[in-house]
Image (tube, rainbow, N blue to C red):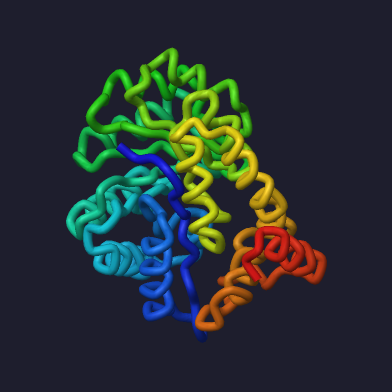
Amino acid sequence: MFSGSIPALVTPFRDGAFDEKAFRKLVDWQIENGSSALVPCGTTGENSTLSNAEHHRVIEVCVEQAAGRVPVIAGCGSNDTMNALLHMNFSKKCGAQAALCVAPYYNRPSQAGIIAHFSYLAEHNDLPIVLYNVPGRTVTDILPETVCELARRYPDRIVAIKDASGDLSRVTDHRMGIGKHFCQLSGDDELALPANAAGAVGCISVTANVAPRLCADFQQACADNDLVRARELNDLLYPLHYAMFEDASPGPLKYALTRVHPWLTEELRLPLVPCNDAARAAVDAALVHAGLV
């Protein structure tokens, strides 16, 4: 269903508000440079500090601007099942192709609770769901057996996973437990090469925000089984993958984007603040290494 380089888009702000004009330009630039789908309102999009009205407007603008050129996977996750369903209902109505739903965070449900959460969503909205497992942020971990159980129960609803567990063995666990039809996407840019080798088909990426063409070409090389080219591109991108997390994300990314596009700002929502000098230096060096500045 999905593959290739899929940026988890930043949400641009200006003077405290969603910068719709800049976001539309960012969407166009991403599509023109080979991104195969778009994810608004994920972690990188600072969804945790968006009001529901803002959250829905960002998704709506993304769908409008993409205009069917690439799929939109709308960030719909919440630790409140009913709020996640609210986001899914809106996303379905405005034309998104799928919902990215993170494991419920903070309240730390059991595996039975995770199954109940995603089952409720799958049974009350027919928008395909991309599971999002990022235990470093949520504390909750969607274990492989839980992923397999959900995919078996709802094969037409729970269709993919963005895995940011850092455990590469899970790609094989999921493939053997569900089948090759289940779409696996890396949630860690620096692990995309080995994840693809194990059976993943793409990456929901932070780095692709600032390096869409390089990331798209890297994913195409992987799809073509051109390991030499994939390694070359991975080596170009590798310092940038790590520079994106030299300080709290997406601070370094928003700084990087200002180096490439003067029409974007570094503005973040509290409690996030602009990245520190060490992160700026790392970003600057990585952008040079990748040939982006």
**Which residue occupies the extreme bottom position in the image?**
15
Left or right? Give the position of 169 relative to 41: right
Residue 259 sits in quarter:
bottom right
Q: Position of residue 216 (x, y in %)?
A: 47, 50
Relative to the observer, which residue lies in front, 159 or 240?
240
Q: Is residue 172 above or below residue 277?
A: above
Left or right? Give the position of 157 relative to 112: left
Total of numbered circles in the picture? 0
The residue positioned 36% from the left and 17% from the top of the image is: 179
The residue positioned 44% from the left and 35% from the top of the image is: 223
Relative to the observer, which residue lies in front, 26 or 44?
26
Residue 87 sits in quarter:
bottom left
Is residue 226 visible in the rendered image? The answer is: yes
Q: In this view, does 143 lie above or below 58?
A: above
Locate the N terminus by quadrant.
top left
Q: Position of residue 285 (x, y in %)?
A: 76, 64
Is residue 133 visible in the rendered image? The answer is: no
**Which residue occupies the extreme right position in the image?**
278
Relative to the observer, which residue lies in front, 80 or 147?
147
The residue positioned 67% from the left and 55% from the top of the image is: 240
Locate the C terminus by quadrant.
bottom right
The residue positioned 57% from the left and 38% from the top of the image is: 192
Q: Where is residue 153 in the image (x, y as percent from the top left)?
A: 28, 20
